[in-house]
Image (cartoon, coloured by chain):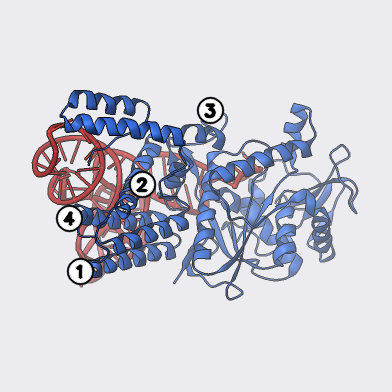
Chain colours: A blue, B red
Amino acid sequence: MLKVYNTMSRKKEEFKPINENRIKMFVCGPTVYDKSHIGHGRTYIAFDVIARYLKYRGYSLFYLQNITDIDDKIIKRASELGIGPLKLAKEFEELYFLDMELLDVTNVNYYARAMEHLPEIIAQIQTLIEKGYAYETSTGVYFDESRFEDFGKLSNRSIEELNVSRVNPEPTKRNPGDFALWKKKDEEPAWNSPWGPGRPGWHIEDTAISETYFGGQFDIHGGGLDLIFPHHEAEIAQMESATGKKPMVKYWMHTGFLNVSGEKMSKSLGNFITIEELLKEYDPQVFRYFVLSTHYRSPIDFSDDALKQSENSLKRIYKLMDTVEKLLETDIVEESETDEVYHKILKDAKKEFLEAMDNDFNTPIALSTLFNLIRDINKGINQENISKNVFKEIKNLLNEFGSILGLNFSFESSKDDLKDELINILVDVRGKLRQKKDYELSDKIRSRLREVGINLEDK
RNA sequence: GCCAAGGUAGCUUAGAGGCGAAGCGGUGGACUGCAGAUCCAUUACACGGGAGUUCAAAUCUCUCCCUUGGCUCCA
């Protein structure tokens, strides 16, 4: 039974989609005003694995993500650079897609840009005005929080608290906690609307988009922890007021923050790491492993040491896979009386792995079951009692786990052919030298190869 | 101040009333010409302090201490 932690109830709940087998999942995408950072990477890898697992479990998933391609930060940045805001957004959007591809985040079905949904945004604002949840002033259209009694239910705040905390409220608003649906603007960039030229507020694009593709209710809404308030709170108010249907979302899922060496990542602290920079230093698989080694809701602390640990852990898996693939090429027995024992080990390992994933996508536990399995297999390899059939099953199971996690455990064989040939020649020569017990020269070859990143290991 | 998430072995992390977990790292041993990988053992009487509930508490309750984040834009 799959259990999912719901931010709304603050506990794990049994997962049951609204429509039997079909899942509608919306995750807040980036505002494309700058390069994506490793915090984005963490969140989108986490939801990528969630998506993979839901599909693995046989659900038919539609994963929708929005792209915020117009907002104040984009406009500010664009004017600094002297280019149009939409052009700037387009450029960073392309970089975002590239980063995601490099990180193997490949399960989003559709990216919906805010600027391509202006008619829907305007229509939803009009509905809110007609139903009396929103009002127009000289500066814009605002949502009237006092009309929505559930306001604050996701972030566990009262309306009084929300009102107190606002500094410098916009003077034409009725309540300090009211938020903008449409901002009236005379200067560019601005779009026409029934209320004159202007731009949409931050929260309205998500509900306009999700209503367009999903209707007023859907299964999963995800994003970073920081979006709970005010963003998701505002979304609930807009959508439930506009459609009259509650709840808007059945399961709210939020990822924990990524810190860098114990501190929040920010430009002013100078510890801001983009995905582009990350990938200059580390393999995408290493970063993915690092992300999955912590539960998606927990804070995760990025450091070189932690990444190094992840790399070493991952090597242990690669190493086993490599050994298994090599042994499959040899002429070991097809079957053995130990097969039954290993069938059970594999069956149990799979069961434990899936139980971990069923428990709110607990990837750290899933990985630990994987390592328990690896130890059992290594033991068997040392004792030379594993048959070819079992090795095939091991390979299949590891690949199955890998595909759920988005990790590729099979060794890349796409190396340069000539390079491979040259290495083989050196390995052959070294083997002959070792037969003649010329260890001095053979060790020299090995250490020189290591200097250029090629590790030779004698059996 | 209010809200939230945390404090688990040297490090990184799971777990959540009763079999002391996983990885990384350190040490010793087996194997090896050596190294590496692997296995075994060890580091390990692990759960921030103090009370309480219970036959039994890392796990529940209370209280205190500390860390981080949010309350303005943020994945």
Q: What residue type is labelled 4?
A: Gln
Which residue bears the numbered disc 3? A270
The number of numbered badges drawn on the structure is 4
Q: Do labels 1 and 4 share a chain?
A: yes
Q: What residue type is labelled 3?
A: Gly
Q: How far apart are marks 4 and 2 (CA)?
A: 20 Å
Q: Distance between the residues labelled 1 and 3?
A: 60 Å
Q: Work out whether mark 1 precedes mark 4 in sequence or the reverse, and give the earlier one.
A: 1
Q: Work out whether mark 1 precedes mark 2 in sequence or the reverse, and give the earlier one.
A: 2
Q: Distance between the residues labelled 3 and 4?
A: 52 Å
Q: x%, y% of residue A247?
A: 64, 69
Q: Do labels 1 and 3 share a chain?
A: yes
Q: x%, y% of residue A200?
A: 79, 49
For the question of whether residue A7 can be seen, the reply is yes
Numbered disc 2: secondary structure: helix
Neighbours of disc 3 within 10 Å: few (<14), some (14-19), many (20+): few
Mark 1–mark 3 contact, CB under 8 Å? no
Which residue bears the numbered disc 1? A337
Looking at the image, is mark 1 or mark 2 nearer the viewer?
A: 1
Which residue bears the numbered disc 4? A383
In the picture, the quarter occupied by the C terminus of chain A is: top left
Looking at the image, is mark 3 or mark 4 nearer the viewer?
A: 4
Mark 1–mark 2 contact, CB under 8 Å? no
Mark 4–mark 2 contact, CB under 8 Å? no
Which residue bears the numbered disc 2? A318
Q: Which amino acid does label 2 sit on?
A: Tyr
In the foreground, A423 or B69: A423
Image quadrant assignment for residue A209 = bottom right
Numbered disc 1: secondary structure: loop
Q: x%, y% of residue A301?
A: 43, 41
